Image (cartoon, rainbow, N blue to C red):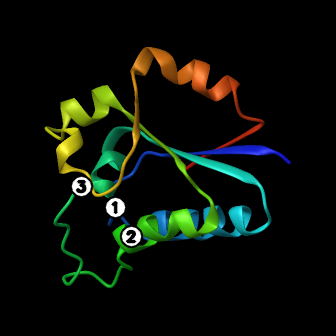
């Protein structure tokens, strides 16, 4: 079994890229691979509470994130500095995450076999 880390950098409704990446994540997890997600930069907005998608034809990505546990995707990391720079704190998030400092990200990368950055 390979260990996959999916690194997300874009905001929740910035186009179809996130939806496509989430599909890849779910597919990878469905084939019994170990999958983790790291949210950096504007991707921290993906887990922010009270998102509105009615103005967009985008899928509700929060609902997809909530379904990750059904696929045994339980490792969800978020970069602390990215959250703080965007005025988000842990209480604003819809899911439990493990906070990683920017200086620790490279070490996190080393613990995975495959890194997919979107």
What residue sits 41% from the left and 21% below the top? 102
Give me the disc on residue 61: 2
What residue sits 43% from the left and 45% below the top? 9
- Which of the two marks, 3 or 1, is nearer to us in this view? 3
**Residue 97 location, x and y as percent?**
40, 43
Q: Say if mark 3 contacts mark 1, CB within 8 Å.
A: yes
Give me the disc on residue 12: 1
Give me the disc on residue 48: 3
10 Å crowding of disc 3: few (<14), some (14-19), many (20+): some
Left or right of 59, for residue 86: left
- Which of the two marks, 2 or 1, is nearer to us in this view? 2
Q: Say if mark 2 contacts mark 1, CB within 8 Å.
A: yes
Q: CA distance from mark 2 to mark 1?
A: 7 Å
**Residue 2 location, x and y as percent?**
82, 45
Between disc 2 and disc 1, whose residue precedes?
Answer: 1
Q: CA distance from mark 2 to mark 3?
A: 11 Å
Q: CA distance from mark 3 to mark 1?
A: 9 Å
């Amino acid at each position: 079994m390979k260990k996959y880390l999916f690194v997300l950098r874009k905001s929740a409704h910035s186009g179809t890229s996130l939806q496509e990446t989430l599909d890849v994540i779910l597919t990878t997890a469905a084939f019994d691979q170990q999958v983790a997600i790291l949210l950096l930069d504007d991707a921290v907005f993906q887990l922010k509470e009270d998102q509105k998608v009615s103005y967009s034809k985008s899928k509700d990505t929060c609902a997809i994130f909530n379904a990750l546990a059904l696929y045994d995707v339980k490792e969800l990391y978020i970069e602390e500095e990215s959250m703080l720079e965007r005025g988000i704190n842990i209480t604003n998030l819809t899911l439990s995450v493990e906070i990683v400092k920017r200086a620790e990200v490279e070490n996190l990368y080393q613990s995975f076999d495959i890194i997919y950055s979107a």
